[in-house]
Image: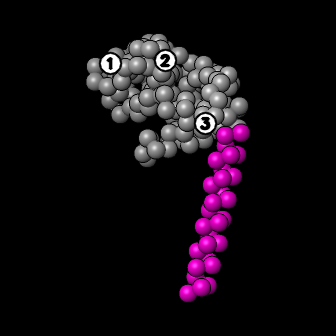
Amino acid sequence: MKRNIKMIKGIFGILLIFFITTLFGQTTEWNKCGLDNLSSLNDFEVLYFNEVFQNRKGDFDFNGKTVAYYTGSSGTTISKKSYYFNGLKNGNNGDKDIHLWQAGGTQLLILNEKEKKLSGGYDVILVSWSKLLKNGKSRKRLVKRLKNNLPNKN
């Protein structure tokens, strides 16, 4: 019995070290995010978005996905990936975890197949700092507007 408890504690310790290393290792690489304005993501951006949206994305994985960005108080201003990450790099939020703070102010809109076609190929929309929730007709308007702003994947 004592041997099993020691083994469980050891496994738990290894998992804890792995989690801390992964979490801190990933967040130190966020400075390699937003270096371009491609709608496709580099490996660091994939890791970053999968981490900060882990509690809201369900089974969705950002790997190989095409992302559109909107911002503004109404959430209707088309933005760029570099602007999203510049907010992290230049933000001053005291003791707050800036990554979770930024993600908390971002609406994650994972597009279904119909919306992907309607948008011209996007998989997800990130709406930063909008005072209005993007659902129903307002979501559909955002998706339709993307058709004129086709994704640049390479």
Relative vertical location of residue 27 with respect to residue 85 in this rendering, above or below: below
Q: Amino acid at mark 1?
A: Ser
Q: Is residue 107 visible?
A: yes
Of the two numbered discs 3 and 2 in the rendering, the one whose residue sits closer to the viewer:
3
What residue sits 64% from the left and 23% below the top?
Answer: 91
Residue at the disc numbered 1: 138
Magenta residues, start to end:
1-28
| Nearest the eye: 78 or 116 | 78
| Nearest the eye: 39 or 153 | 39
- The quarter of the picture where the C terminus appears is top right
**Sequence-first tag of 3 and 2:** 2
What residue sits 70% from the left and 46% below the top?
Answer: 25
Give the residue at the far bottom of this rendering.
Answer: 1
Q: Amino acid at mark 2?
A: Thr
**From mark 1 to mark 2, how far is it between C-alphas?**
14 Å
**From mark 3 to mark 2, how far is it between C-alphas?**
21 Å
Relative vertical location of residue 50 with respect to residue 130 in this rendering, above or below: below
Relative vertical location of residue 136 with respect to residue 9 in this rendering, above or below: above
Residue 86 at what x, y percent from top left?
64, 22
**Element class at badge 1:** helix
What residue sits 64% from the left and 29% below the top?
Answer: 94
Residue at the disc numbered 3: 97
Residue 99 figure quarter: top right
Residue at the disc numbered 2: 71
Residue 115 at what x, y percent from top left?
35, 27
Position of 100 with respect to 130 (left or right) is: right
Q: Is residue 59 magenta?
A: no
Which label was assigned to residue 146?
none
Q: Amino acid at mark 3?
A: Asp
